[in-house]
Structures are given as structure tokens and as C-alpha cells.
Image (tube, rainbow, N blue to C red):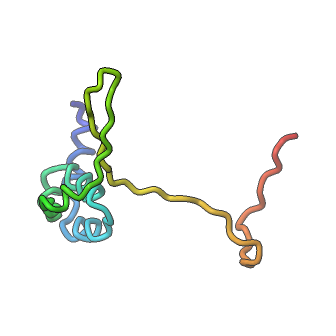
Amino acid sequence: MSKRSNASHSQWSDLPIDLLDKIAGCLETQSDLGRFRSVCRGWRSSAPPPPPLKASRVLRLPWLPICDEFDEPYYFGLKEFTVYSIEPLPMDCHYKPLTTPRQLPT
């Protein structure tokens, strides 16, 4: 590794614990917490591990069985992720844009 990459690596791992606590407190999903904890050993120790899955919770997940062309079954399960949708505001909301939209070429 170059000296530059070592320096940037150590800067991330040397963030103050109080700052890491604030960051960890803002995480909303288990996947975000997992990503946070995977940065380095210091970050992993600053955030609590996610609670273990209970067997009853795992069994309640809907499984989708599919058969391939040889009639061999395989299964799909749910995966947690976040989706954000952008929707237009109602015309009567009385908001003004911060900038004017650019004219599209015709």
C-alpha cells in the first residue's frame, strides 16, 4: 500500500468515539448497521451487533419455490433494502423552485 492510502485508512479508523456513536445512532436499517460495522475494527466495536434472528422469525419469511428445466427446486427469499421514490408535489402546494428549469433542446 502507498503512504497516501495508509494515511487515509488511519484517518477513518481514528474518528472519535462520540462521533461514531452519533453516526451509529442515525442508522435506520440492519443493513446500514452492518455496513457501518464492516468499515474497520474500531467502528465495529463502537456499534452494537444486530440482534440475532429468532427461528420463528426466519420461518415466517415467505419463500418462493421455483423449479428449473430439470424440475429441480430452488428457492427465493426476501432481502431487506430501502427504496426512495420521488413524486411531484401537488400543483396547489405553493412551493417555488430554487432555480428555473433549463429549456430542453427541441
Q: Where's residue 21, x and y in %?
A: 22, 69
Does residue 3 lie above or below 95 as drawn?
above
Between residue 88 and residue 106, name the one nearer to us: 88
Residue pushed farthest right?
Answer: 106
Direction top: furthest residue: 70
- Is 101 or 57 nearer to us in this picture? 57
Residue occupying image coordinates x 72% and y 75% = 95
Task: Looking at the picture, tell me which residue is in the foreground, 52 or 6.
Answer: 52
Residue 67 lies left or right of residue 92; in this view the side is left
Residue beneath the point at 62% across and 62% down: 87
Q: With 55 as the anchor, is 102 left or right in this view? A: right
Residue appearing at x 72%, y 68% in the figure: 97
Q: Position of residue 44 (x, y in %)?
A: 15, 56
In the rendered image, is residue 46 in sight? no
> Which residue corresponds to the image point at 23% horizontal and 58% vertical from the top-left?
60
Residue 78 vertical position relative to residue 55 in the rendered view, above or below:
above
- Residue 89, visible in the rendered structure: yes
